[in-house]
Image: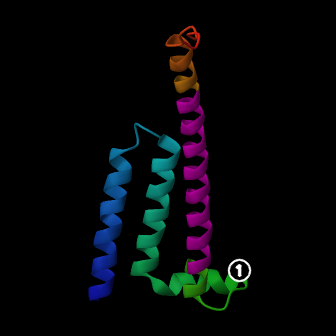
C-alpha cells in the first residue's frame, strides 16, 4: 500500500506538470497525461496489466509495463535528439551570420 501511494503521488506530480506545460506542446503534454493516467490505473489495478499482457501474448504484466516503458523512453530520447539537432543547426546559422556581419578586411603583413 505504501508503494502504491508513493507511485500515485509521483504520477500526480507528473500529470500536474504535463498539464501546466500544455501551452508549449499540446501533443507531448496530452501524451504524458494519458500515459500517466494509464500508469495510475495499472498501479491501482495491477491485475489489469496481467490481463492485457496475457491478451498481447506476454507472460506477466510487469514485463508488459517494462516493454512499454522502453518504447516510451526510446521515443523520448529520439525526440530530444531531434530537438538538440535543430537547436545546433540554428546556433550554427546565427554564428555564421554574426561572423559575416563582423568580418574585416585582412591586413597585409608588415
The location of residue 46, given as percent across then percent down, is: 47, 85
Q: Which residue is drawn at 39% across and 80% down?
A: 44
Q: Which of 24 and 51 is in front in this view?
A: 24
Furthest residue toward right: 57
Main SS of the magenta segment? helix
In the rendered image, residue 54 lying in the magenta stretch gets the answer no
Seen in the image, is 35 located left or right of residue 12? right
Residue 107 sits in quarter: top right
Q: Nearer the viewer, residue 48 or 18?
A: 18
Considering only vertical position in the picture, is 82 above or below 93?
below
State the extent of the magenta-drawn residues as a range.
Answer: 66-92
In the rendered image, residue 85 lying in the magenta stretch gets the answer yes
Q: Residue at x 55, y 51 (%)?
A: 80
Furthest residue toward bottom: 59
- Residue beneath label 1, please? 56
Seen in the image, is 98 located left or right of residue 18? right
Q: Which residue is drawn at 57% across and 31% down?
A: 92
Secondary structure type for disc 1: helix
Number of numbered discs: 1
Furthest residue toward front: 110
The location of residue 70, given as percent across then percent down, is: 59, 72
Amino acid at each position: 500500500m505504501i508503494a502504491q501511494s508513493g507511485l500515485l503521488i509521483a504520477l500526480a506530480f507528473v500529470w500536474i506538470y504535463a498539464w501546466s506545460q500544455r501551452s508549449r506542446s499540446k501533443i507531448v503534454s496530452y501524451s504524458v497525461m494519458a500515459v500517466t493516467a494509464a500508469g495510475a490505473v495499472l498501479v491501482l489495478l495491477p491485475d489489469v496489466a496481467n490481463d492485457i499482457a496475457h491478451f498481447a501474448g506476454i507472460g506477466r504484466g510487469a514485463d508488459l509495463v517494462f516493454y512499454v516503458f522502453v518504447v516510451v523512453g526510446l521515443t523520448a530520447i529520439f525526440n530530444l535528439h531531434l530537438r538538440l539537432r535543430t537547436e545546433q543547426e540554428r546556433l550554427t546559422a546565427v554564428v555564421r551570420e554574426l561572423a559575416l556581419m563582423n568580418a574585416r578586411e585582412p591586413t597585409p603583413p608588415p
